[in-house]
Structure formats: structure tokens, C-alpha cells
Image: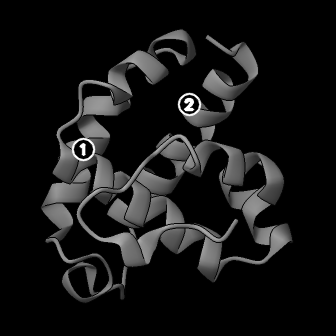
């Protein structure tokens, strides 16, 4: 386990899910293909984890949950400037991109990050 990647995943995934689950004015269904409750449920499952538990927990997610987590992170990456990412997500763009690369979307290849 890469401790830095685990810590960055802990920070970025939690912040992205929290921000999107609590976003007002966001049409969750249109933006992510799921109701707001699905995001809140996923956040509730991951939020209690410690940084050293997050990477193994990702392995237990269903394909749909992994894809949703990827879409949430992808939305943050594509909608925020570098400064916003650092202030709202707590990571640089480079670090956030490293985290998103550990999530492999399987149901919708259009959400794959650029190389």
C-alpha cells in the first residue's frame, strides 16, 4: 500500500462525495445519473474509514459504486480550477488525478480521464 496515495484518496474521495452530496442547485440525476441519496449513501459508507483503510475498501465496492465514485471525482476535476481544487478538495490537481486513476470505471468508458 502506498501511504501517500491512501491519504490522498482519503482526502479527495471524502471531500468530493461530501461536496456533491450537499450541493444545492445541482441536478444529481442529470449530472451523475443517480439521485442525491445514492451519493449520500456512498459517502456514509466511506466517511468512517481511516486513511489506511480506504484503498482496501475501494476493492469491496460494486461496479456501480466504483463508477459513481469515479463520476463524482471526475465532476470535481472538470468543474474546478486548480485553486478551487486545492481549497475545496485539499489536493493539487496532480494528486487528485493520481487518485482518480485508481478508480477504473467499467460501465461508461466516456468518463475515463485523459492520459
Q: Image quadrant of residue 82?
A: bottom right
Determine whether, in the image, residue 80 is placed left or right of residue 32.
Answer: right
Identify the residue position indicated by label 2 in the image: 10
Pick the quarter of the image with the N terminus: top right
Residue nearer the viewer, 50 or 97: 97
Q: Residue at x 29, y 58 (%)?
A: 68
The image's mark for residue 15 is: none
Residue at disc 2, secondary structure: helix
Determine whether, in the image, residue 58 is placed left or right of residue 114.
Answer: left
Q: Position of residue 80 (x, y in %)?
A: 68, 76
For marks 1 and 2 on the same chain, the one whose residue lies earlier in the sequence:
2
Q: Residue at x 68, y 27 (%)?
A: 5
Is the residue 44 above or below the residue 28 in the image?
above
Q: Residue at x 50, y 44 (%)?
A: 13
Q: Position of residue 65 (x, y in %)?
A: 22, 48
**CA–CA distance between discs 1 and 2?**
14 Å
Is the residue 28 above or below the residue 3 in the image?
below
Q: Disc 1, disc 2: CB below 8 Å? A: no
Determine whether, in the image, residue 72 is placed left or right of residue 76.
Answer: left
Q: Residues within 10 Å of mark 1 (few under 14, many from 20)?
A: some
Identify the residue position indicated by label 1 in the image: 42
Is the residue 84 above or below the residue 110 in the image?
above
Q: Residue at x 70, y 14 (%)?
A: 3
Q: Image quadrant of residue 20?
A: bottom left
Q: In this orientation, does residue 4 appear?
A: yes
Amino acid at each position: 500500500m502506498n501511504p501517500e496515495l491512501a491519504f490522498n484518496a482519503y482526502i479527495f474521495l471524502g471531500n468530493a462525495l461530501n461536496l456533491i452530496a450537499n450541493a444545492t442547485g445541482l441536478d444529481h440525476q442529470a449530472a451523475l445519473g443517480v439521485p442525491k441519496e445514492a451519493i449520500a449513501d456512498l459517502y456514509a459508507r466511506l466517511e468512517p474509514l481511516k486513511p489506511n483503510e480506504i484503498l482496501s475498501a475501494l476493492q469491496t465496492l460494486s461496479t456501480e459504486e466504483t463508477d459513481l465514485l469515479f463520476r463524482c471525482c471526475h465532476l470535481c476535476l472538470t468543474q474546478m480550477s486548480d485553486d478551487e481544487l486545492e481549497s475545496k478538495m485539499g489536493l493539487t490537481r496532480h494528486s487528485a488525478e493520481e487518485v482518480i486513476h485508481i478508480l477504473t470505471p467499467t460501465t461508461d468508458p466516456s468518463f475515463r480521464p485523459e492520459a
